[in-house]
Amino acid sequence: MAKLRNKVKFADEMRSKAADIACPSCQKRFVFPVLLPCLHTICKKCMANEKLTASKNGRLPHCLVCSQSFDTRRDFPLNFVANNMVNLAAVRDNTSLNFACDSCETEGEKVTMRCNECQLFLCEFCTTAHRRISATKKHILQPVEHLKGQISKGSILTSLSFCSVHSSERLCSYCQTCNEIICRECSITRHKEHELSKTDEAAKTLKVNMVNLVEQVKGKLKHLSGQVTNIKQEISSSEDHKRKVCSTVEQYFKVIINALNNRMNELVNEVETLCATKFELLFSKQKKLEQTAQHADSCCLFTETAVKQGGELEILSVGDIVIEQLTALIEETERLSPRQESEGSVKLIEFVGEQEKIINDINHLGHIKEQTLSTPCEPTLCILSSAKQHQHVITGEVNRMSLTAVNRQGKKQQRGGDKVKLSFSLASSRVTPDSAGFKYGCQDNKDGTYTLAYVITKPDTYWLHVSVNGCPVADSPVTVTVRPRDWVGTHLILPSEDCGGFSHPYSVLADAHDHVVVADSHNHRIKILSLKGEVLKTFGSQGTVEGQFNFPYCLALSRKGNLIVVSDGQNHRVQVVTPSGKLARSFGGFGDEVGRLNHPHGVAIDDSDRIYVADSGNSRIQIFSHEGIPLGMILHKDMACPWGVAICRTGHIAVTDYNNHKVCVFNEDGSLYLQFGSRGDGNGLLNNPAGITVDDQGQIVVADRSNHRVQIFQQNGSFVTKFGGKGQGDGLMRFPAGVAVDKRGHLYVADTFNDRIQVFSLAAV
């Protein structure tokens, strides 16, 4: 057995001891250990007891290790690290713990099975009962001997495999919108329109964020350790200085007659009194810093262990709570960081003797005074130029700002020497990215002012943090949006809450009157705007009756501009309305028969007023007359999920195939003319292409949705150019779904997950 344990490297790394798997509440082995927000652990049953006790006492439940309170309304995940330790200890020959049955707790009964759902060790009698009870008879029971076999393979991790909603479906995807692990059934129902990713990809990203936060906490931990060292040194220096002052006082009075001994003791006591207050504060700070450092070390150890051995699902199950605690630790360490003062700001005490007057005024002989040699800089009063304005900069360019140091009296410092530091984090997640090409420099002008310079090479929106002597300045952090060097944006329309804002706009088009029409999909309405972003008309509401919408996805405009064709996605129909919002006609309905639709997306109108509809759920393009009468359809064996439809100047029909990551161009008779694209992120490669349009030169413009960009192709499918990139800054996008062009040469992009419409210069592209 010893040889088997030697193979399990992660078990050694966890430094498993009896104390590591003992609940701090019941002092027994963990049974279903849950992870608290502070990253400490408690049995699920003990936590329920703690909630009950706290409720009776009228207080919040708190962790028994660090006393941090927690919200009883949230769900706490299984601590798979502690659970693995329990499993490991259970199969060791020399375990010091008493592994009695978790169900009956009968002493002497041999544990033979473990329930993977309940996380319980069971004796033979309780195993039989577990298999008979209706609530648990479908649970997976694992012989303890099998755990030993898993150890030899290097893993005894618990698998959280099945969906809580669809119990027979395995968890396979991660919803970025809801931060939830879901099954295949959930992905096509409740989370259909959400941003989804595979569990391995999401877990990989989460691991990177967790590791980055660990590194930040470790960096803060070093700072805490440094602060503890500084305080210890300050205590030692103060004690030395105290002894020197006391010695001076004592030596002075040795040459004075014995009558002065009482006065000498008064002065010594005064020194002790002055120092006592300072020592009390310093020792208190030392204790708090050491406690925080110990907690940070514990959290880092847990997180590193979880990252090394955690599977995808386990990481996802604890990732949010781990990141929350590590972020809280970072904020705590910043809050505890004392304002550093230069050596010249230390208050000194000294004895001043007046020996010549000693005989004349013995009752007032000597005194103790404190002396401040200089006034230190106060970071919260320092002035950072342009800090209150949102900074817009270009990738790779050097950007400058100035910092003016101010002392506690509110006056500008006349000297330099302060430690000024810059750092940055993503505004969306507060995490410092690995590679953004961030560099900075600081020039001390020796007159209380500093010139700061920085460069960021990766487009996105960041927070720029500025600190003086380890403490943030008043206007820090500064919001900085980094644009691509070749950004061609002209302006943004309704980027936020103006006139109600947008909620996932999926489609956009421009008419001959310089109006912009937007399918505000998750608001279930259509908006008509001016080129300046002024709302001219809004119509529609959520519902199933004619004139109402249920996720309107795509739009098309008749040749005369007097009718707007709307794909009413989850009502499985097409509605034709006037620009004033009046319903002209409606056709479709759920089904796979001719004329019926299944989640329609793209719509287009040709010169003969025929309406082309991307019948996405039925993998076909249906053609209707302007009255809604079925005229025909386009089918192709390789077309899986048509999304966007556009009519080329040559009469060809261009279609984006969302699931096959390509563009298909059909002849008017429905035969395939050409197809181009495949899955990838290189030039000309596509990842879930959505909206499509054709410009005045016949070029095909595609919303390359999951690549977060727009690509432009020649009529023969040759790549021309691309622009965009994932992010929230100007020129960046998040899952764009619609594109349109107007006669002025503007290119409109429905930047769906950023809830805005971006406008670009097509000529510049």
Image (cartoon, rainbow, N blue to C red):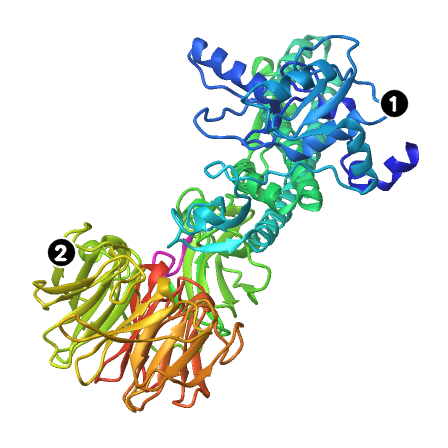
Q: Amino acid at mark 2?
A: Glu
Quarter of the image with the N terminus in it: top right
Q: Tag on residue 546?
A: 2
Residue at the image position 65 percent from the left and 18 percent from the top: 24
The residue closer to the viewer here, 188 or 341, is 188
Residue at the image position 17 percent from the left and 80 percent from the top: 609
Q: Tag on residue 543?
A: none
Which segment did they paint magenta?
Answer: 383-390
- Give coordinates of residue 348: x percent, y percent: 61, 33
Q: Earlier in the sequence, mark 1 or mark 2?
A: 1
Q: Could you tell me which secondary element the residue under label 1 belongs to?
A: loop
Residue 21 is drawn in which quadrant?
Answer: top right
Q: Height in image: 67 above or below 481?
A: above
Q: Height in image: 55 above or below 615?
A: above
- Give coordinates of residue 537: x percent, y percent: 11, 63
- Cα distance between the residues tagged 1 and 2: 74 Å
Q: What residue sits right under mark 1 in the picture?
A: 94
Residue 372 is drawn in which quadrant?
Answer: top right
- Give coordinates of residue 51: x percent, y percent: 49, 17
Q: Is residue 241 visible?
A: no
Q: Amino acid at mark 1?
A: Asn
